[in-house]
Image: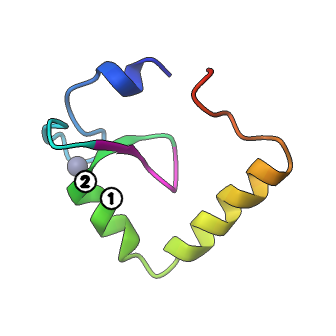
Amino acid sequence: MDRFFTQETCDRCGGSLKSGRIMSMYNEECICMVCKDKEREQSDYKEAVEAEHEQIKKGNYKGIKG
Ligand SMILES: [Zn+2]
């Protein structure tokens, strides 16, 4: 999980993470803000967010402790 904070390139597009990084809502990729914006436009993005919330409620959230 430390890799999330130290890596310098987006897992998805390979672009720089200098302008910001965020965890993908679909998997555990560390992605740039451009890719995150694209995720938000996915038709199933809301479902992915809700699925994530379900996991947190069940106590399966892995969080940053890893
Ligand atoms: Zn990217």
The residue at which mark 1 appears reads as 36
Residue at image position (82%, 53%) is 57
To which quarter of the image does residue 7 belong?
Answer: top left
Calculate the distance from the C-alpha at mark 2 to the C-alpha at mark 1.
5 Å
The answer to if 46 sits in the magenta stretch is: no
- At mark 1, the secondary structure is helix
Q: Is residue 3 left or right of residue 19?
A: right
Tag on residue 47?
Answer: none
- Give how far across and how far down residue 28 sits, in percent: 50, 40
| Viewer-nearest residue: 5 or 51 | 5
Residue 20 rendering spot, x and y as whole percentages: 24, 43
Q: Are marks 2 and 1 in contact (CB under 8 Å)?
A: yes
What span is colored magenta in the figure?
Answer: 21-27
* Residue, disc 2: 33
- Farthest right residue? 58
Give the amino acid at mark 1.
Answer: Lys
Up/down of 64 relative to 49, above or below:
above
- Residue at image x 52%, y 77%? 44
Residue 6 position (above or below residue 40) = above
In the picture, measured across the screen, residue 39 lies left or right of residue 46, that is left
Q: Nearer the viewer, residue 24 or 56?
A: 56
Looking at the rendered structure, the kind of residue marked 2 is Met
Q: Is mark 1 within 8 Å of ligand 1?
A: yes
Residue 65 horizontal/vertical position (percent): 62, 21
Q: Decide if ligand 1 comes within 8 Å of the CB at mark 2.
A: yes
Q: Residues within 10 Å of mark 2 (few under 14, many from 20)?
A: many
Residue at image location 77% in from the left, 59% down from the top? 54
Q: Quadrant of the C terminus?
A: top right
Q: Quadrant of residue 6?
A: top left
